[in-house]
Image: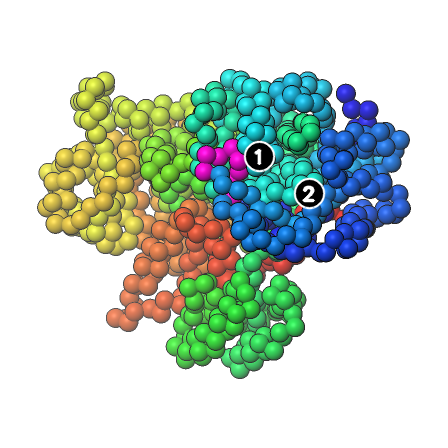
Amino acid sequence: MLKAHLSIIGLDANFGGYSNIDLVERAFYQGSVAKQFSLATSADKSKLVADSVARLASTNNLNIQDINIIELSQNTDLALALTQSEILIAQNKLVALVGVNIFSSTDEDDLKQKSATISFDESFISYNQVEGIVSILIAHSDFARQNALYIYSNIKSFAVGDNVTQTSSLALEQANITAEQVHLLEVSANADKTLSDIEQQGLLQTYQNDSVLNTALSCAKSVTGEGGEFSQLAGLLKCIISLQQRYIPAINEWQNANSNVLSLYQTSAFYIPTESRPWYPNSDGSAHIAAYSCQTTDNYCQIILEENLLAATSLTTNERFPVQDIRNNGFIANGDLSIFLLSADDEKSLLDKMASLNSLTSLSLKELAKSCFAQFDEQEQYAVVLLGESLAELNKEISLAEQGITKAFLDDSNWKTPKGSFFTAKPVGKGENISFMYPGIGATYVGLGRDLFHLFPQIYQSVAALADDIAVTLKDTLLNPRSINRLGFKALKQRDLALRGSLADIAEAGVGYACVFTKIFEDVFNVKADFATGYSMGEVSMYAALGCWQQPGIMSARLAASDTFNNKLCGDLLTLRDHWNMPKNSDDNELIWETYTIKATVEEFALASTDEPKVFCTIVNTPDSLLVAGYPPACQKVIKKLGVRAMALNMANAIHSAPAYSEYNDMTQLYTMDVTERIKTKMYSSSCYLPIPQRSKAIATSIAKCLCDRVDFPRLVNTLHKKGAQVFIEMGPGRSLSSWVDKILDSKVTNNTKLNSMNHLSVPVNAKGTSDELTYMRAVAKLVSHGVIMELSHLFHGSMIVKK
């Protein structure tokens, strides 16, 4: 057992050109191999250590003289350093552990790491030899709390020995936890094959349990390469950061476990994430647990770490997830991508400001972006927003903008670049005209929203509070699949198809992520909706995301138990079988319902389907684009009559059709929940194309009718636009609604003249295959240029370090 309760109160690191802890944290999250970067000469090593510890002291408002420095060396590994630290901390002293690696060799062939993977991988070749420094400040937990110092995580136990299995088991026992409670295991995975095999096999024995795919393997060396004592401490640092920032880090280029241990992996608790993903809260509210397996040539140590949860106060006694426990970071503020905001009241002033950027060559890209933000005036009439990842790219965007802005003023039009820079000469975002649009559930896909909680940590607690188990609500294991071997394109495609086949799962995930997207705009950007609408089951998302229900989380259990959404209108499609007098149990796996997208008008479809009672037009997307669904052979007849191409969507759910009315009462009951105080947003439904009163019965009735009736999306959009909505923000995956809004509003004709497409703005906030970070920057560029007032300081400032 520990002689003292140890808390981590300070972090500092520098390697691979990542010169501060926030850049290091970003590197760990992204998981790419660090570049070679010379840190210092050996003569500067003592100054390197002193400067790092000084930063730890300054952040915590401590005297550097009060900090005992233990520098790891060949004679003092992490295990011995922790043992010494425990003795000192028991005496109420402060300890800084420091690991440094500086080398003199410059043999490029020896320094190139081929891929971001580890020695447990059958594709592993070698690690980098990296220069770097890591410093970690440790104090007694009582000292940290008495002095109001921020705690990044706590060390529950550590054990030292020469047998991996026995030492690991002892560490778990001393921490009074089971292996099943460890959801992240940081490993050493040394390049030396003998050492690597000993560690791997020992851990596979320790973590043999019934909880398959329960514990993620992580390894700092996939990013940092190998660097002696530095590597030992880098592994501990990565573990601490992951706990504090609440994410499971990736081993980006992991391929497969070695064949000689594959069977052991299959019966172990391990999985290997190849993309970083959220670490959602435990359903019982307990702290996350991580372990660090630290192996050297001479001995072995396992450290058990525990997340430091914010203690409840008199104000948060009844809150499972206190909103004060926000874990900020500098992920966006320290990213390669920068955003430049420039404003003016006329064309000449705007062009002059933009040209002046070229003269500020003494500033770094990030300093230049911050300078522009500090001078930006949202009250001025025009705004251009530029995106760039380097000064060269910024200069290119400026050159394009100089021509594009001039033309935009002449034409009363927009200017944009492939990167995402944007300007409009006719802003439409000033005033109460913002509409949130919630897409249907069919757009949900594997990998959706994986980075959002890290990009916008402000939303983590409020989203977690929406359900008893938010990981289940957001379908964590479905959207972020776990596996031992890397999932290829085909395997991921199959999981996407399987997801689309479960109406209850995608309905719940769709609602959950609608809340996520909405909270980003409401809580981070401070943008509220004046209008809102939902497309198909997006209507359910709308009511949940805008906070109309007191307890939206109870919908999770209802959907899971819903016969309507699991068996009657999806799955076995029992309602259809009754409606069409088909046997309830069919062994031939015949597909009895499919949905197709076609190019046709409603009138053309009506003529072609007159004699086909098993075919329905379920949704009108645009005046000449429809979804038709029903019994596949009958659908094919109608499609052939129309003479159009059709694409099957692999969506076997029979909503928006006459048979769905058999489940109307059950759906009304399913969505009847107590409501909150009235919100200001006007919520329009495709059940009546009018605003829905925020009353329990009105909402439930509206949803049930919406899910039975055909959706006429053009009518919905035109109604909103007529009532004053001009900015349409798509609160969900994909950009389908945005594209359809553009097509619907751009094609409106008044007095035989096509309306200028500048009378509205549509903005998607998610694009499959494009990073969420870039997608949101592009969305911000459009909204800001159109005059929408947003809180944007998060894009320019932020750090995971909490200063006293």
Q: In the displayed structure, does residue 591 sit left or right of residue 673?
A: left
Q: Which mark is residue 192?
A: 1
Is the stretch drawn in magenta largely helix, strand or loop?
loop
Which amino acid, by three-letter code, is at mark 1?
Answer: Asp
Residue situated in front as seen by the camera: 131 or 268:
131
The first of marks 1 and 2 along the sequence is: 1
Q: Position of residue 154 (x, y in %)?
A: 73, 32
Of all residues, the one furthest to the bottom in this rendering is 348
Residue at 35 percent of width and 26 percent of height: 566
User: Where does label 2 land, which residue?
Assistant: 230
Residue situated in front as seen by the camera: 681 or 215:
215
Quadrant assignment, res 492: top left
Q: Is residue 338 above or below residue 15?
A: below
Q: Is residue 586 above or below residue 364?
A: above
Q: Position of residue 202 (x, y in %)?
A: 58, 22
| Helix, strand or loop under label 1 | loop
Image quarter (top left, top right, bottom left or bottom right) of the N terminus: top right
Residue situated in front as seen by the camera: 455 or 177:
177
Q: In the displayed structure, does residue 634 sit left or right of residue 348?
A: left
How many numbered marks appear?
2
**Magenta residues, as a range?**
116-123
Residue at 54 percent of width and 59 percent of height: 337
CA separation, marks 1 and 2? 17 Å
Q: In the displayed structure, does residue 157 sit left or right of residue 341?
A: right
Instruction: Please say whether residue 84 is visible from this viewpoint.
Output: yes
Disc 1 vs disc 2: which is toward the camera? Answer: 1
